[in-house]
Amino acid sequence: MKNSILKDLIQKNNSKIVLLVIDGLGGLPIKGKTELEAAKTPNLDRLASIGSCGLSEAVASGITPGSGPAHLSLFGYDPIKYLIGRGVLEALGIGLKLESTELAARGNFAQMDKKGIILDRRAGRISTERNKELCDLLQKKIPSLGDIKVFFKPVKEHRCALLLKGKDLAEGISDTDPQKEGEKIKEAIPLTKEATQTANSINKLTKKINEVLKGKIPANTILLRGIAKIPHLPSFQEKYLLHSACIATYPMYRGLARLVGMDILSTGERIKDEIKALKENFQNYDFFYIHIKKSDSFGEDGAFEKKVSIVEEVDTFIPEIEALKPDVFVVTADHSTPSLLKSHSWHPSPFLLISKNCLPDNLPCFSERACCQGSLGKFPATEAMALMLANALRLKKFGA
C-alpha cells in the first residue's frame, strides 16, 4: 500500500495492538513435519480456528531476507528503499549514539585455521563474558588505525559491534564474512570509488585483529557484516500515530526498534520476562512489538527439536497475552529459518491475526501448510501494518 494513501487514512483511537514475532518460525519438513507442525501448540491452534491466517513475504518471491529488511517489512517500511546495515542495528541496540559521519559494522567472533579458512562462524557461541574480555583486549591493542578511531563493543555471545570515527569514511563496502564455513575470510571490497580508502582501512584492521586474537581459539578472528552509516527513517509516530514499544532480548532488534522510534522496555532474558514486561506496560502504549529470538538461533544450528521446544514454550504464554485483551493480536515471523537448511530461507512466514473484526478461517491448526488455506493468502509483509491498523479501526474509508 502506498504510504501516501495510508497516511491520509490513519486516525487515532484507544485500541491496542500486539505484534508477536517468533524469529525464523517457518520451517521445512523433517520426517514429514516442520518444526511448527511437530510442536504441541494448543493455544495457537485454537487461535487459528477463530482468526485470519495467511503467509507473509518479506521482500519478494525467492528472495532470502536478512533480519533487518525482514523486520522493516513487517513494520511497513520498504526494505529495498531503506537499506540498513546490520552494524547500525547492532550499535543502536547496545545504546550507542551514531553520528551521520561514523561507520558501524556487526562483527562475529569466529574461528579460522592457519590458512584463513573459517571453521566456525560463531566461535562456538562463546559467552558474552568472554566476548567482553576479547573486546577489551582489542580496544587496548587497537584504539586507532591512523587517523581513524576504533571502538570494539560487546553485544551478546559471539556478536560484537565495531564503530569507526574519522574523516571521509565511506559506505559501500562488502562484508568480510563468507557466510559459510570452509571458505576463507573475505577482503573488504569497495563497491564505489569513494569507498576505496575506507575498504583498505577495513582490511588493515582485519589483519591487526587477527594478530591480536592469534591463539584465542575458538575466537581468533572477527567477521564483519553490514558496514554502514545511520540512515533517517520516519518514526512509527509519524507514520502511524502510534505510541510504540519494543520488548526484545537481543540488542540488534532493540536497535531496529529504536531506529523507527519505539521505546525500548527493560526485560530479562526469558520469554517469561518478556511477557511480564508486556503486562507491566500494557496501559502505557498503543503498539507492542515482542521478539522471540531462540527459535531462529536453533534453526540456524540445525537443532530441530530445540526449535520445536521454543515454539511450544511461546504457546504456553499465549493465554496471558489474550488476557490483556488487545484489540489486535498478531503472531508471525520476520522470515523462515528451517533447521533443514541451517539458515534463513526465502519461504514465506505463517501469519495469524486475531481481532473482533477479522474473518475466522476455522483452520485446524497454526502451521505453514494450514496458513496456505487462510483468507489472507500470500501477501507482502509491508502490508501487515495496514492489516493491523484496519482491524484496530485506525483507518478511515478511502474515497467517497
Image: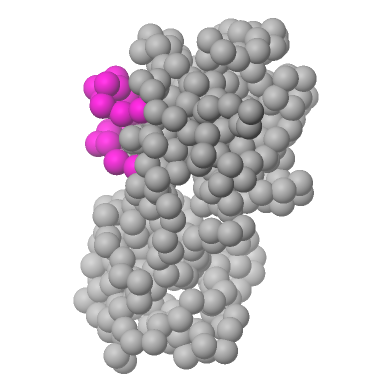
124 part of magenta stretch: no
Magenta residues (range): 262-286
Q: Is residue 110 above or below residue 138?
A: above
At which x and y percent is residue 239?
Answer: 45, 44
Would residue 143 be visible to someone looking at this image? yes
Given residues 140 and 75, the one toward you in this image is: 75
At which x and y percent is residue 223?
Answer: 48, 68
Residue drawn at x 23%, y 67% as measured from the top left: 136
The reply, left or right, for residue 258 in relation to residue 137 is right
If the image is split into quadrants, where does the N terminus sit? top right
Q: Is residue 19 above or below residue 230?
A: above
The reply, left or right, for residue 379 in relation to residue 15 is right
Give the total of numbered labels: 0
Given residues 1 and 125, the one toward you in this image is: 1
If the image is split into quadrants, where does the C terminus sit? top right
At which x and y percent is residue 369?
Answer: 75, 23
Quadrant of residue 230 within the rendered picture: bottom left
Residue drawn at x 48%, y 56% as measured from the top left: 122
Residue drawn at x 50%, y 41% as measured from the top left: 7
Q: Is residue 136 above or below residue 78?
A: below
